Image (tube, rainbow, N blue to C red):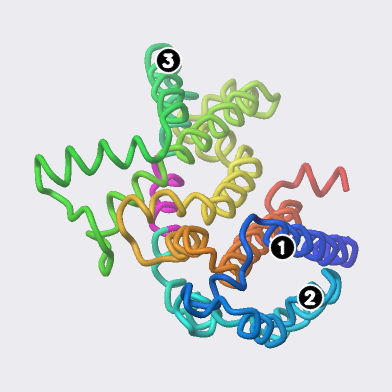
């Protein structure tokens, strides 16, 4: 099974890299004009020299094979805007993005699972309130949430800084913005998984034997529901890297997401290709690991396998 998953992972990464490079190749605008620097350099001789230097006259498949071969060895090219190695640019900004994702993951796991447990155990008004609140959270776009949090907690109340990073305090509002949608998903999955577990026979037997409700919830219901909860937490965390694009731009964080936005706006194709490939590769790798670990987390999956 692991070998088959690994082969599928490699095939998916290859297909993804081809799509990303092809999209950049077909994007409007000639990269030569951006590499030339200014109108005074747009002479036929200079443009021909640039095309020869960057092998832009080669066929598409030749360019793709060269780019893929370099990417596999860690050479992601040189940025057209910063005139620096793309790998170094990404490496310098990666800690900020990973810190934001880690902070947001802690928030949505803790509060999402807690709200899901509350809705499943209490029911009634508590259940309705959690469902209504999570529905509202998923319906509000991230940039709207960011604007509201900046206006309320950053400008009016002055509790949190609204720009830049460097500490957990700076990352609090961005992390809350990033975690809200994920929190709604995890709370719903937790609620549904626990409702299903409460109807199983072993829970009914435990309740009939006089076991305290608190022990029934923790030992039988929540433990049995951990499989889908942990799996969904892993999938949501993997998808958060793409979500940082909006959040980092809104809060002026110097991370991978904001680097991608700047690269797209300036037609910096090497950076755009590298960041998009990194985001998709990270998502594919994490989801594959979650799928491989799922039988260890959920015994029902192991029995079916």
For this orientation, the residue located farthest to the left is 157
From the image, tell me which residue sits under label 2.
63
Q: Residue at x 73, y 76 (%)?
A: 56
Query: Which is nearer the N-term, disc 2 or disc 3?
Result: 2
Task: Point out the stretch of residues depicted in magenta.
Answer: 101-111
Residue 295, horizontal then vertical, whole percent:
76, 52
Quadrant containing the N terminus in the rendered view: bottom right
Q: Quadrant of residue 221?
A: top right
Q: Is residue 134 left or right of residue 274?
A: left
x and y, in percent, of residue 198 in the image = 60, 24
The image quadrant that residue 51 belongs to is bottom right
For the residues bearing labels 2 and 1, Cβ distance under 8 angstroms: yes
Helix, strand or loop status at disc 3: helix
Classify 10 Å Cα crowding around label 1: few (below 14), some (14-19), many (20 and above). Answer: some
Using the rendered image of the protein, determine whether residue 77 is visible from the camera's viewpoint. yes
Label at residue 25: 1
């Amino acid at each position: 099974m692991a070998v088959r998953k690994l082969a599928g992972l490699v095939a998916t990464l290859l297909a993804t890299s081809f799509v990303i490079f092809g999209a950049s190749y077909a994007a409007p605008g000639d990269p030569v004009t951006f590499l030339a620097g200014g109108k005074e350099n747009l002479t036929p001789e200079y443009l021909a020299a640039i095309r020869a230097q960057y092998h832009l006259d080669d066929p598409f498949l030749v360019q793709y094979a060269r780019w893929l071969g370099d990417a596999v060895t860690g050479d992601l090219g040189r940025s057209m805007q910063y005139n620096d190695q793309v790998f170094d640019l990404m490496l310098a900004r990666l800690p900020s993005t990973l810190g934001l994702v880690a902070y947001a993951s802690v928030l949505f796991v803790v509060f999402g699972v807690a709200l899901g447990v509350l809705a499943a155990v209490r029911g009634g008004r508590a259940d309705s309130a959690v469902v209504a609140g999570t529905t509202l959270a998923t319906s509000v776009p991230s940039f709207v949430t960011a604007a509201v949090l900046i206006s309320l907690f950053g400008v009016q109340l002055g509790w949190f800084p609204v720009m830049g990073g460097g500490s957990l305090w700076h990352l609090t509002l961005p992390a809350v913005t990033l975690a809200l949608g994920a929190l709604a998903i995890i709370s719903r999955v937790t609620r549904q998984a626990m409702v299903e577990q409460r109807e199983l026979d072993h829970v009914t037997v435990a309740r009939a034997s006089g076991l305290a409700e608190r022990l029934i919830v923790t030992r039988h219901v929540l433990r049995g529901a951990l499989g889908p909860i942990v799996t969904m937490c892993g999938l949501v965390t993997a998808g958060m890297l793409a979500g940082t694009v909006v959040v980092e731009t809104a809060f002026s964080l110097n991370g991978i997401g904001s680097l991608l936005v700047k690269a797209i706006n300036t037609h910096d194709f090497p950076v755009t290709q590298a960041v998009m490939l990194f985001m998709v590769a990270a998502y594919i790798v994490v989801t594959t690991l979650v799928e491989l670990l799922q039988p260890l987390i959920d015994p029902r999956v192991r029995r079916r396998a």
